[in-house]
Amino acid sequence: MLNKEPIVPTGRWTREQLVLTFALYCQTPFGRMHQHNPDIVALANAIGRTPSAVAMKMSNFASLDPAEQASGIRGLSGAAELDRAIFAEFSTRQDHLVEACEQASQQFDGAAAVLDQSPTAIELDDPIPFAGPTEVQRTVMVRRAQRAFRRAVMASYDTRCAICEISLGELLIASHIIPWTADEDRRADPTNGLSLCALHDRAFDRGLITADESHRVLVSRRAIMDEAPPLHRVGLIDIAGHPLRLPARFHPDPVALAYHRSNVFAA
């Protein structure tokens, strides 16, 4: 086995260091992007950078995120060209990011473990496996991509339902706006995701609710009943017109919401 070159926290950032840092950025709430965050400290130690340097690089990524800029959150403005390239390459493709992290982690002992122990990682989603001669390997990769998708969505929504704001991770699901089966390229895109509790995820998936162009909840006529029990009324009927709680980053894609209104929602 070849000896690894010693890593020192000086010089230019490598692509591998940036890939791993961007992955942690995707699954870290903005308020926790500081040098004392244990995950940032652990990743910094693994990749040979200081915690303050990793936190600063994550702020650079935030400065490139239009959703965070629109919400009033401001990162640092010193993003380098390679930072911009990493953001453009992976911001909507967690599946590609997972594969890149797999390769980058081979250079840095302990880096993969940091990303696998995200505080938002209560893993409830069970994606549909691929079929074919490489089914096992591809299923492993798609499940990792789905976990990364969930972590990015949960971190963006601060582990709260976008409709009722319940914050029990055990009841939250990273819901796909364009369904999983409809578009393979959007399966791991966090802008194609909403953080929803189990009730609202099911209602969204079955077309009983959606969101309009102003991110307000629309309720299907199928869900409206004159003598609905209290939970039905509070959980479905009364949420009509309620604004979605938008995330700090990875805002829901208007194109994806338009697809959901046209192809899933039962008006």
Image (spheres, grey):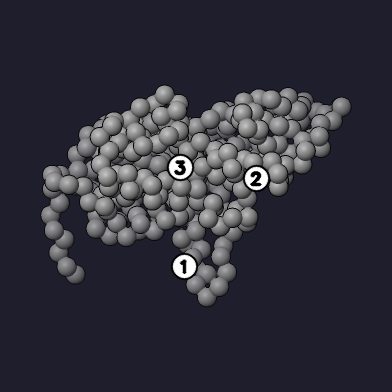
Q: For the residues carrying marks 3 and 1, which lies nearer the camera in this image?
A: 3
Q: Quadrant of the C terminus?
A: top right
Q: Is residue 138 visible?
A: yes
What is the secondary structure assignment of the residue under circle 2?
Answer: helix
Q: Percent x, y for residue 241?
A: 69, 25
- Tag on residue 152? 3
- Considering only order in the chain, which callout, 2 or 1, is on the residue closer to the N terminus? 1
Residue type for callout 1: Gln
Q: Is residue 173 visible?
A: no
Q: Is residue 236 left or right of residue 132?
A: right
- Considering only order in the chain, which callout, 3 or 2, is on the residue closer to the N terminus? 3
- Tag on residue 137? 1
Image-quadrant location for residue 44 = top left
Which residue is rendered at x = 42% and y = 56% of the image?
96
Q: Which residue position is annotated with label 2?
A: 259
- Considering only order in the chain, which callout, 1 or 3, is on the residue closer to the N terminus? 1
